[in-house]
Amino acid sequence: MEHLGKRKWVIAEGYIPKYGNGKEPEFTSHETACILNTGEEKAEIKITIFFSDREPAGPYKVEVGAKRTLHLRFNQLKDPEEIPKGTDYSSVIESSVPVVVQHSRLDSRQAENALLSTMAYSE
């Protein structure tokens, strides 16, 4: 199958709640970039995180194998630094090959969990 998608994606809305309510790790509040690689070649991904009050962080580097998907929790990004919880941020995702990116958030701060999902903006 050919590579579907784009090489550059933007998620303008990002926020990792400081705490959650419920069983860990399933109900840990988190942000996720769902990355789909439909092609025959692995995708080398670079993520840059932008903040309102400081210089950007990154690039964070991950790979998505050929014909694979990765549900990447932003909470799990540690190198070059952790993304601070309770802070607004935005992200730019750049890929070596076209991929598709969807954004989701689980907010479990209340017993009634909230889940949102949206497509990222592609360039």
Image: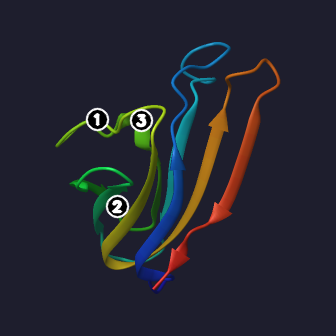
Colour treatment of the image = rainbow
- Residue at 62% of width from left, 50% of height from top? 104
Instruction: Point out residue 105 in the picture as x, y percentages from the top left corner.
Output: 62, 44
Question: Label 2 vs label 1: CA separation?
Answer: 24 Å
Q: Quadrant of residue 99?
A: bottom left
Question: Label 3 vs label 1: CA separation?
Answer: 7 Å
Looking at marks 3 and 2 on the same chain, the residue that comes earlier in the sequence is marked by 2
- Residue at 31% of width from left, 60% of height from top? 47
Instruction: Point out residue 55 in the picture as x, y percentages from the top left corner.
Output: 22, 55
* Viewer-nearest residue: 51 or 6: 51
Numbered label attached to residue 65:
2
18 lies left or right of 20? left
Residue ranking furthest to the left: 80
In the rendered image, which residue does mark 3 sit on? 75
* Viewer-nearest residue: 97 or 57: 57
In the rendered image, which residue does mark 1 sit on? 82
Instruction: Point out residue 110 in the picture as x, y percentages from the top left corner.
Output: 75, 21
Three-letter code, disc 2: Gly
Q: Secondary structure at mark 3?
A: helix
- Residue at 42% of width from left, 43% of height from top? 74
- Residue at 25% of width from left, 56% of height from top? 56
* Viewer-nearest residue: 39 or 98: 98
Q: Secondary structure at mark 2?
A: loop
110 lies left or right of 32? right
Q: Quadrant of residue 40?
A: bottom left
